[in-house]
Image: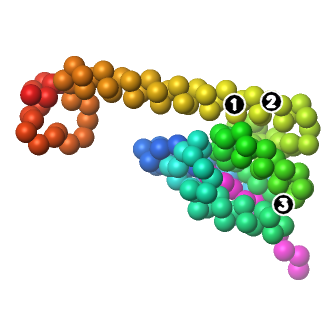
Amino acid sequence: MSKKEVLHIYVRCSTEQQIDNSIKRQTEMGIKFSKELGMDYKVWSDGGLSGLKSMETRDQWMELKWEIEMGNVKHLWIEDYTRITRNFEDGVMIDKMIIEGDINVYEGLMSNQIYSPSDNNQRLIKVMMNLIGSDQKKNEIKKSIQGKIRKIEQGLHIRGMISYGYKKEGDYLV
């Protein structure tokens, strides 16, 4: 009896608040695709850990990476290639691992098409999307922080616990 191939499903979202919906949706999509392929599956979930941070902060990715390096992964499903990382240098290293390991990487948001980093056109598109996406994310974070600072300077309560000595009147702290 031959052993069934395994589709490794990597899921991640950017924040803790997205976990309930995003991780569940990604997991269900990956499992559905594994069944279409007639493969077993293994889910690797790093929950709400940002793709802008170092990959070393994501335990499940680091274990999956080790499995890839050991040659135990031949099929990997991700909703979008940026789920792995938004860091350019990490992306180059991952592309190299995928090429050397001869791994089929299926992207859920691309109708489960195989991403091949050895195809220079595909790789160029991914690099550009990654760079643009990480810049957009950094700009969103900056704008969010600036908006919060403005509200604090105006005496508005943003959210969370009210500091000792203050009380909330309407939207203001007094």
> Label 1, on which residue?
131
From what the image shows, is residue 81 above or below residue 63? above
Within the image, what quadrant is residue 45 found in? bottom right
Mark 3 vs mark 1, foreground winner is 1
Q: What residue type is labelled 1?
A: Leu
In reply to whether residue 3 is colored magenta, the answer given is yes
Q: Residue 74 carries which label?
A: 3
Amino acid, disc 2: Ile
Write the residue at 69% across / 30% down. Answer: 131
Distance Cα–Cα, label 3 vs label 1: 27 Å
Q: Tell me how far mark 3 sits from mark 2, CA to CA.
A: 23 Å
Which comes sooner in the sequence, label 3 or label 1? Answer: 3
Residue drawn at (78%, 62%), measured in percent from left and top? 68
Which one is in front, 73 or 167?
A: 167
Tell me: 57 left or right of 67. Answer: left
Verify CB contact (< 8 Å) between mark 3 and mark 1: no
**Magenta stretch, residue numbers:** 1-11
Element assignment for label 1: helix
